[in-house]
Amino acid sequence: MWLIGDSRVSDQHNDLGEKVSKLEHDNHRLILYYKGDISALVLFAQQENGSICFPQPLPKLSSTFEENPVLEGNVRLHPAQLLNQVNQLLQLDDDLLRLETDFCEPVDTPNGIVQVHLARFILLDPPHTLMQQRQCKMQTLPALRKSPPAELELLRRVYQKVM
């Protein structure tokens, strides 16, 4: 069952310095990527702080699970709500990103389990200029090799899925 709607919302500043609505349960992140249909070029959006997770980085000491754990509870945030939040944060048109609904990776953090979702840019050309205007970069996988271990493992799993 998905939780749709955000009746409990508070205002908070994020890493990009913009005021955004934040769900009371801060246990979801989104990885944004671009894949060229002809060239198969894969690029990942990276925030100015170096994280590939939006709207904010994973906490330090986060780690991925080898196998997906059974998550307690029946109600989960629908990733479309997270996508809407990131679109608002980055001031993107609603049709630039598409959720990859078959990707949801749990990450163990000091604050509890965080669900990491995936969204693909639906553009013919890589969105370098678009993301630079938002203090972000589009990076290849080798350029992200200095990312935290949990993010590196997430990148590996995303790359394996999209290729």
Image: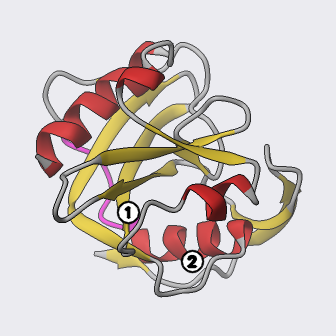
Number of residues whose C-alpha sits closer than 10 Å to that of mark 2, classed few (under 14), some (14–19) or many (20 or more): some
Q: Residue at x 80, y 66 (%)?
A: 20
Question: Which contiguous range is marked in magenta?
Answer: 69-77
Mark before the other along the chain sequence, 1 or 2: 2
Amino acid tagged 2: Asn
- Disc tally is 2
77 versus 48 height, above or below: below
The answer to whether residue 103 shows anywhere in this view is yes
- Secondary structure predominantly adopted by residues drawn in magenta: loop
Q: Quick one: SS at disc 1? A: strand
Q: Residue under circle 1? A: 119
Q: Which labelled disc corresponds to residue 84?
A: 2
Please tell me whether residue 71 belongs to the stretch shown in magenta: yes
Contact between labelled residues 2 and 1, with CB atoms less than 8 Å apart = no
Observer-side mark, 1 or 2, equals: 1
x and y percentages locating residue 106 in the rendered image: 32, 39
Task: Please give left or right for residue 136 compared with residue 106 in the image.
Answer: right
Q: Residue at x 35, y 29 (%)?
A: 141
60 versus 13 height, above or below: above
Q: Residue at x 19, y 65 (%)?
A: 37
How far apart are labels 1 and 2 at the CA level?
11 Å
The quadrant of the picture occupied by the N terminus is bottom left
x and y percentages locating residue 147 in the rendered image: 50, 19
163 versus 78 height, above or below: above
Please tell me whether residue 57 belongs to the stretch shown in magenta: no
x and y percentages locating residue 159 in the rendered image: 21, 39
Number of residues whose C-alpha sits closer than 10 Å to that of mark 1, classed few (under 14), some (14–19) or many (20 or more): many
Q: Residue at x 36, y 57 (%)?
A: 34
Task: Please give left or right for residue 99 compared with residue 112 in the image.
Answer: left
Say which of 54 and 136 sits in front: 136
Q: Which labelled disc corresponds to residue 35?
A: none
Amino acid tagged 1: Ala
